[in-house]
Image: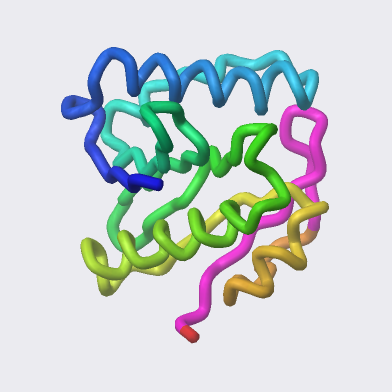
Amino acid sequence: MNWHLKPFAQLSNFELWQIYKSRVDVFVVEQNCAYPEVDEKDLNALHLFAEQDGILSAYCRIISDDPVAKIGRVLVVRDRRDSGLGRILMQQALQAVQSRFPEYEIHIQAQLYLRRFYESLGFDAVSADYLEDGIAHIDMVWRQV
């Protein structure tokens, strides 16, 4: 498993295609949620992904907005789920934020059904649950553990 953290301009065409395809597969097709998955935030984000044998396995993006870093679009491709890769991905993301933006708070907008998973990584809920694109979410902030 190889991990990569790249700004948009350093992604190869193939890496970008894999990222967008995986995001659409998960967030639009699997979750049956029609919305514009590709947005301008990608241009300024750091893109963290794992690949094995040249194929994307897990992905998230990190958006820095002083004094906050937001981890979002967290996904593990279908055939790699239930392998612990989601936890490793989030640990890699937290490490990346801490090393690049040590003074920033770390925020996520978590799907509500994943609340316990994120709590196990040190996140605390800071909002009531709400619907975003028809899916229950909750805002969470990481407490340094």
Q: Where is residue 116, by image quadrant?
A: bottom right
Q: Residue furthest bottom?
A: 145
- Residue 42 place in picture, x, y as percent: 36, 28
Looking at the image, which residue is at 69% across and 44% down?
A: 81
Q: Residue furthest front?
A: 53
Instruction: State the predominant SS element of the stretch in magenta.
Output: strand
Q: Magenta segment, which residues?
A: 129-144
The verdict on residue 37 being magenta is no
Q: How many marks?
A: 0
Drawn side of residue 73 relative to residue 25, left or right: left
- Residue 27 place in picture, x, y as percent: 66, 26
- 41 up-or-down from 101: above or below: above
Q: Nearer the viewer, residue 67 or 26?
A: 26
- 87 up-or-down from 12: above or below: below
Drawn side of residue 84 relative to residue 61, left or right: right
Looking at the image, which residue is at 27% across and 34% down?
A: 44
Q: Which of 123 and 11 is in front in this view?
A: 11
Rendered image coloring scheme: rainbow
Looking at the image, which residue is at 34% across and 45% down?
A: 2
Drawn side of residue 65 relative to residue 83, left or right: left
The verdict on residue 136 being magenta is yes
Drawn side of residue 82 relative to residue 113, left or right: left
